[in-house]
Amino acid sequence: YGLQCAAATALLNRAHAVGRLDAVVCSTDKNFLTPVGGSVVYCPDAATARAVGRTYAGRASGCPAADLVVTLLSMGLGGYRDLLGRREAMRGDFRR
C-alpha cells in the first residue's frame, strides 16, 4: 500500500537517494485500482530490474499490465493525483 501514503513514498525516495534501496514491489490492485494479480517492481537501475525478471518463473499473463495501462490512461494524471489526495485525507480517519 506504500504508494498511497506520501510519508511512505518520502521514506522510499530518501532510502533510494542514500543508496539503501534495491527494489520496491507494489501490488497493482491496491495501488492502482486494477483487478488482482499484477505487481510493479521499481528499481534504481536496469540491471536490478533484469535480475528480478530472471528470477520469475514466467507464468503470468500480460493482462495485469494491460489493466494498469488502461486504468492509468482512463484516470489521467489529474485523476491519479486526486485519488492519492483522497486516500491521504482518509489516513487520519484510520488513525483514529
Image (cartoon, rainbow, N blue to C red):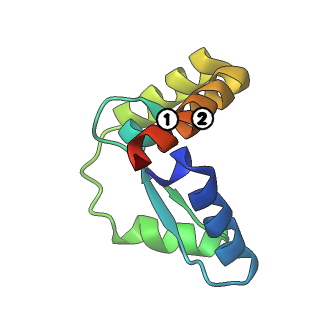
The residue wearing badge 2 is 84
Between 51 and 29, the one nearer to me in the picture: 29
Going by the numbered disc 1, the residue's amino acid type is Met
Quadrant for residue 22, please give it: bottom right
At 59% from the left and 67% from the top, the residue drawn is 43
Q: Which residue is farthest right?
A: 17
CA neighbours of label 1 inside 10 A, class few (<14), some (14 to 19), many (20+): few
Disc 1/disc 2 C-alpha distance (Å):
10 Å
Q: Earlier in the sequence, mark 1 or mark 2?
A: 2
Provide residue 83's location: percent of width, then percent of height.
Answer: 57, 27
Going by the numbered disc 2, the residue's amino acid type is Leu
Query: Is 42 positioned to the left or the right of 31 in the image?
Result: right
Q: Which element is circle 1 on?
A: helix
**Marks 1 and 2 in Cβ contact (< 8 Å):** no
The residue wearing badge 1 is 90
At 63% from the left and 51% from the top, the residue drawn is 6
Please determine whether, in this image, residue 81 is positioned above or below residue 21: above
